Image: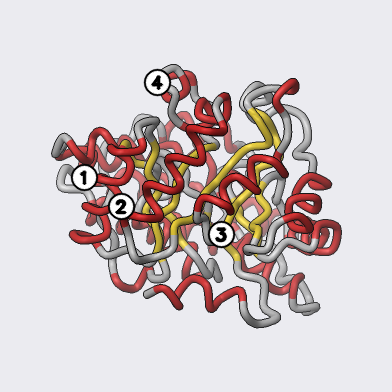
Amino acid sequence: MDDALLALFEGSRTPLYLAPQAGVSESPFRRLCRGFGADVLVSEFVSAAGICQGNAKTREYLRFDDEERPIGVQIFGSEPTTMAEAARFVHDVYGPDFVDINFGCPVKKVVKRNGGSGCLRDLDLVERIVRAVADAVPVPTTVKIRSGYDESSRDPVAIGLRCQEAGARVLTLHPRTRSDMYSGHARWEEIRDVTEALSIPVVGNGDIRSGDDALRMKEETGCHGIMIARGSHGYPWLFREARAALEGEPIPTAPSVEDRFRVCLEHAENAVAFEANPEKAVREFRKHLGWYTRGLPNGKQLRQELFQSTSLDEIRELLEGYLDEHRRRGSRAA
């Protein structure tokens, strides 16, 4: 399985990653993005402590299908021993192609336990965690970092070199600090600096919202791979557009409303099938409904109705009703 990830970086093709995103990159969305061209998938981030404690809900996040390979499971925590134990369990029981360590999450409830980007306050700790995980599993250990905890500690090259020295085989950089959260612009020049400084593959992440953005990141930074996160919300077509741009091919036109809703329903059906509780699946899918209907005429009213839906049938009926009205408006305009 070692080759499944690292072999992707050996040719001229730039691998496209779907970012690990809590509450978003569950298996149905991962498989959908794979269909549109995502080369590498990563699970939602999972608590190492929860894994080691046998928490059933935590372990639900570890499920994936073979069709999702190459796939990595991302874990977070602040205790090297616990991180190593969790990585070993994940490898032995679930068999992902790689284990990814989250040093990037800026969310307060994670950082206050010194997890995610909270670890970046102590680079000795970062190194110990990476080394412990790398020693625990035979598959590649990869890491996802931010540029620092805050502006005063901003030094992505130093962080990247420590991770590489400890045994990381691939490094992803989101060039914002924890304090930045998601504000401002990602400093892509830092991706370039890290790519030039490290001997392992570097994946760039941050502010990819179009195929042109993906091409520009590649040209400006020389990164070996590109990770797409929030730009994919309600728009898995972004992977197809990014691939076309990177290959110098015409970028496909944006999907029609009909195509958008067809994929939305396919995604919803798979989400309900994946979750044991259909009602819970529909509730959790509402955020995706908001993203799929972004930018549509009268979209606000449609979203208000969709956010009250409790079943697949209701979702289907509301989308079909909108499409009927959309076609009538088109006919009147013609």
Gap between marks 3 and 2 measured at Cα: 30 Å
* 2 or 4: mark nearer the eye: 4
> Which residue is pictured at 61% across the width and 69% down the height?
15
Q: Alpha-carbon neighbours of circle 1 within 10 Å: few (<14), some, or many (≥20)?
A: some
- Residue named by callout 4: 113
Could you tell whether 72 is left or right of 184 in the image? left
Residue that label 2 marks: 271
Label 4 sits on a secondary structure element that is loop
Foreground residue among 2 and 276:
2
Q: Where, by quadrant of the figure, is residue 230 drawn?
A: top right
The residue identified by callout 3 is 170
Which is more foreground, mark 1 or mark 2? 1
Q: Residue at x 37, y 44 (%)?
A: 75
Label 1 to label 2: alpha-carbon separation: 17 Å
Q: Amino acid at mark 2?
A: Ala
Residue shown at 34% from the left, 73% from the top: 67
What's the residue type where badge 4 is placed?
Arg
Of the two numbered discs 2 and 4 on the same chain, state the one appearing first in sequence.
Answer: 4
Which numbered disc, 3 or 2, marks the residue that appears first in the sequence?
3
